[in-house]
Image (tube, helix red, strand yellow):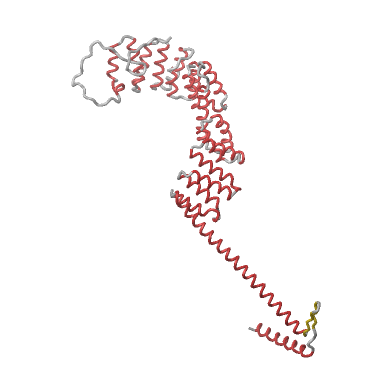
Amino acid sequence: MKKLLILLLILLFAGAWVGQLMIQDSGYTLIAYNNVTIEMSLWVFLIAMFAVFFLFHWALNLLRGSLRSGQRFRLWSQGRNQRIANTKSLKGLIALSEGKWWQAQRLLTQAGDKSELPLISYLAAARAAHEQGEDADCDELLNKARDAAPQAEIAVGISQAQILLSRGQYEPCLATLLDLNKKAPKNTYVMKLLREVYIQLNDWSALSKLIPELRKHNAVKPAKLLKTEQRCYSNILEKSISQLPAHADNEEKAKALGTAWHNMPGQLSSDDVLARHYTNLLVSIGAEEKAEAAIRDLLKRNWDDSLIALYGRIQGSDAKKQLEFAKSFLNDYPMNADLLLTLGRLSLRNQHWGKAVDYFEQSLEEESRPETLSELARLLQHMGETERTLKLIENNFSLIGNGLPQLPMPEKAVAITKPEPIISDDHIHAKPRFKPIS
């Protein structure tokens, strides 16, 4: 209040002073331009100049205010559209998480470029279109995502690769991933997708080259990576045989298989899973001597029931040494049914008929198996012990009769005269033909 009063007093004194000056001398002002002259007092000229200045200032403020109003309207309109787009994006993402694909695609597509994050909207809309099987719409939305955010090429490419992979379009998916791998060689997710595509394409050679990169960048957990290696090199071993010409003999197959085995990374040569597979392949092509040596090395490292069972089925270079090697495990596994069955078979190869019977009987006592029953019954039959064979079958009939339907049977057993044992190498279904193996 005091400041206002002081200001009014100053203006009053200033006005009185200026008024006194105007009375004393009005002054003279002349403005001439070509043939036009304008005459006025100095004070009128000054008042006119102030009036023009204030008029110009007012007009300028008016223009500036109108421009600001238009800008405010545009900002308000843009903000409103963005809020609407953000709301649609949120609703679309919720619909996507709930599996409402059509609704999600519609809302996210409408949001589009008007949302704060158009890339996310378009990628999510592409996924919704993919879930509906709308491949054309999906591809179009992916292109819009790429155009909306060129700097996010890797992200869009990964989404496209995922969609192609789920469609089963492995070749274009592989092309996309290889391009991404060149642009982002350290991207572990691209490596994971490449691993999956190579498996689907059965491209084991390419997968074997990718595995060191997976290990280097810790792209896959060690346990999963080990399984990948085992699967990869197991198929490489099989392929080394299958890709040979149809007329290739067993010797050529064994050579190709051996080359594939020795070309594997050093640490995998001691992998039990791969070694077992390699051994089984050797057996399948008739290279039993090599298989016997491989199984012997495996059993020295780690005991395995399936390996000792396989060891009794193959014929090594020296049947006596093979039997002695199997016997060396009796102290540690005296009641193992697989070991006893193998010892019985190896005893047959050495023509130790009595010992073979003992081993088969012990194995059958430890674990009743149709395979062991068949081996023992076949041996007893060829030893001429028919009654013992029939009694053996009668006592273990449940092994060969397992799975038979419940059918009516005679109340009294019918006496069997002139029995003809029917026993095969694997099951008791046909007359045996047995020759001692020397």
In this rendering, would 405 be left or right of 78?
left
Q: Which quadrant holds residue 393?
A: top left
Q: Is residue 118 above or below residue 287?
A: below
Q: Position of residue 193 (x, y in %)?
A: 53, 38
Q: Position of residue 200 (x, y in %)?
A: 50, 33
Q: Is residue 61 above or below residue 288?
A: below
Residue occupying the far left of the picture = 411
Q: Between 425 and 53, which is closer to the camera in this rendering?
A: 53
Q: Between 101 and 7, which is closer to the camera in this rendering?
A: 101
Residue at 49% x, 57% y is 87
Q: Is residue 345 above or below residue 221?
A: above
Q: Which quadrant holds residue 47?
A: bottom right
Residue at 30% x, 24% y is 402
In this rendering, would 262 be left or right of 104?
right
- Tally the numbered discs: 0
Q: Between 326 and 101, which is closer to the camera in this rendering?
A: 101
Residue at 53% x, 20% y is 244
Q: Position of residue 76 (x, y in %)?
A: 56, 64
In this rendering, would 69 be left or right of 326?
right
Q: Which quadrant holds residue 157?
A: top right
Residue at 33% x, 22% y is 368
Question: Image quadrant for the C terminus?
Answer: top left
Question: Image quadrant for the N terminus?
Answer: bottom right
Q: Between 178 and 332, which is closer to the camera in this rendering?
A: 178
Q: Position of residue 421 (x, y in %)?
A: 29, 13
